[in-house]
Image (tube, rainbow, N blue to C red):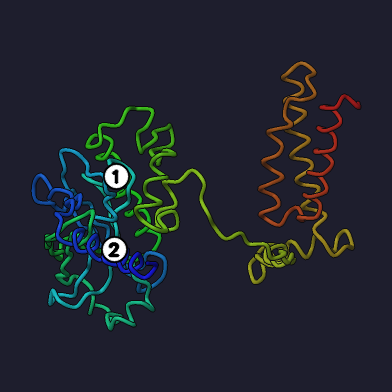
Amino acid sequence: MKGIILRAAGVAVVALTLLGWWLPQPAHALIAYPSSDPEVIQFNAYRNVLETGDFLVIVYENTPYATAPGVNYSEAYVWRMYDTDGTSELAQASGYNYHSRGYGYNAVNFYFSAAELATLGLALYPTYWEQAYVFRLSGTFGADTFLVPRNYNFTISPSDYSSLTDTAEVKVAIAQRIIDIATDLNNKWGLATDYELTYSSETGTTLSIYGQSFFRGAIYGVQAMAPSIFPLAISNVDVDARTWTTAYAANLEGQYAGTYLEPAFTAGEGFFDVSYNVMGILIILIVCAFIIGVNWWLGGGNLWRGILESASPVIIGARLALLPLGEVGLLIAMVWLYISAKVWKLI
């Protein structure tokens, strides 16, 4: 009896399996094709972005959908970069799912370091430069994407390549291009003012917090490529201790060597029997005293008149080696102590 029950159960399992095999299965939730053919609004290619010999391509594109599918753009589509033959694949990239799941207007980038270009055999300039590379937008095959994916091909032209080679200038150009894209996306996406990708101030236009969020995801490493449009710039700080020398002071003292003024300076030192320019110090002090005295007399006894004007002869005298830099530093320290005491009402 027990054996009959087991055989019956086995037959039932087989029958249910076959029934499930032959019954119609629900269709996959495939997404629709774009409402019109995707387009590349503009290519922009740059070299020497982060290092000498690297290569960056920014693709500003539009994959139009009247209603965004339920699957993210990065899952439904992939961008591929091919060599000029259109068959040798060089790299892949995905769109950033920031607005409307990534559909519509978006930015994609391809970056190659100098080492990566060497690996691809494109290292020697101008081997890779101003070439007609093929960029292909391909749909993905899957249960939630396309049963028959479509491909859309675009070719970069020589006019899309930047002529700049200096890294600092290249970064400025990239920054301006990103601001242009961000400004256009403000309109294309219909963003409210509080959520725009750009922020304008008295000092210029930078990326807002929303613009920073988008472009950091769309262009990996953009803050290093275009630091000027970020309110916080990342840079290397020189923390090496500075070595102080007397080279500048020595250059000032020796600037009259071999001229007709050298004997005059030597005679002044001999007259006072010293090794430094006492005569020059006295001349500067007399000039300052004269300026302060005349201003005091004209100002009706105002002791502060002439102080500012007397600073100019001190600076000029130091440059002409009439006043040694050590004495200038001492004078500045005394003035600073006096001002600090006045500010804190100590005197």
Q: Residues within 10 Å of mark 2 (few under 14, many from 20)?
A: few
The answer to whether one can see residue 330 in this image is: yes
Residue 6: x, y in percent?
Answer: 35, 67
**Of 169 and 335, the residue lying toward us:** 169
Q: Residues within 10 Å of mark 1 (few under 14, many from 20)?
A: some
Amino acid carrying mark 2 in the image: Val
Q: Is residue 277 above or below residue 288?
A: below
Q: Residue at x 13, y 52 (%)?
A: 39
C-alpha separation, residue under disc 2 versus residue under disc 1? 44 Å
Quadrant the N terminus occupies: bottom left
Q: Residue at x 75, y 34 (%)?
A: 290
- In the picture, measured across the screen, residue 317 lies left or right of residue 285, that is left
Quarter of the image where one finds residue 202 = top left
Residue 262 — which label? none
**Of 20 and 226, the residue lying toward us:** 20
Which structural element holds mark 2? helix
Quarter of the image where one finds residue 13 = bottom left
- Which residue is labeled 2 in the image? 13
Which structural element holds mark 1? helix
The answer to whether one can see residue 164 in this image is: no
Residue 163: x, y in percent?
Answer: 25, 64
- In the picture, measured across the screen, residue 43 lies left or right of residue 334, that is left
Residue 188: x, y in percent?
Answer: 22, 37
Q: Is residue 316 above or below residue 304?
A: below
